[in-house]
Amino acid sequence: MKKNLLLSVTLASVLVLRGQVKDVELTLQPTYTHQVYFQFGTDNQVSIPAATWDIAFLRISPYAFATRVNDSRIRVFQVANSASQWNLIYIANEASWTELYNSETVWNKGAFDNGSATYGWGEYNSNTHHVVGSIVYVLKYTDNTYRKFMIDDFSSGYTCKYSTWDGSSWGADQTVIVSNSSGTERFNYYSLVDNQQVNSSIP
């Protein structure tokens, strides 16, 4: 109820500032199983199951980057500030990890962007003109699945790697490459669970 009330007040406030009042109905489904994205001006809305994506990458141009994490089911922790620590991450150290969050006020500033590197998750390399990953994260899902994650490189697209904890050790590293095609201010959405890109028409 609180989320519905807050959403209604926010929408009403924005519409009043525009000099008009309009009722908009957004349905999140029971227990908030869906996320609804609404575009002012066109009244277009897209509803998707919250469990279909894990991470999102900005794709407004080949030179702009930003991320989001599906924080309805994933908590993000910075666990190391050097890529050299990738093989030295232990679940037993969870109490010492630093939790990071998506920005609540800037849509294109996600948890990875709030890491301790210059660009959140990485540093600029003036020789290659790439942003190179230096921060290691662990993603903790609501079902207590752990995935170790890094954005290795950005240059007109994202190269990432991740590994899933099997209860006693980390599994084999998986590589993900997500292009950063030009377009409107939207994201490419990726499921680490299914190891594939999902609906990219979400605002």
Image (cartoon, rainbow, N blue to C red):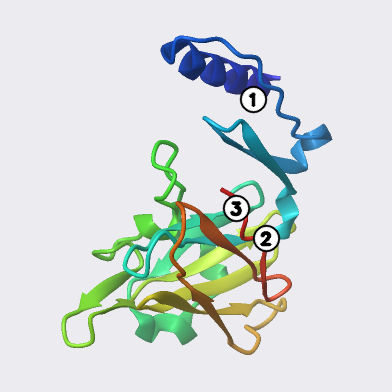
| Foreground tag (2 vs 3) | 2
Q: Position of residue 143 (x, y in %)?
A: 75, 58
Say if 155 sits above or below 59 in the image.
below
SS at badge 3: loop
Give the residue type that dot 1 points to.
Lys
Q: Position of residue 77 (x, y in %)?
A: 48, 60
| Residue to which mark 2 is pinned | 199
On residue 70, the disc is 3
Which residue is farthest right?
Answer: 30
Q: Quadrant of the N terminus?
A: top right
Mark positioned earlier in the residue sequence (2 or 1):
1
| Residue to which mark 1 is pinned | 3
Q: Position of residue 153 (x, y in %)?
A: 38, 80
Tell me how far mark 2 sits from mark 1, CA to CA: 25 Å
SS at badge 2: loop
Q: Residue at x 37, y 70 (%)?
A: 62
Q: Residue at x 46, y 75 (%)?
A: 150
Say if 70 sits above or below 65 in the image.
above
SS at badge 1: helix
- Give left or right: position of 3 versus 178: right
Say if 141 sits above or below 3 in the image.
below
Tell me how far mark 2 sits from mark 3, CA to CA: 14 Å
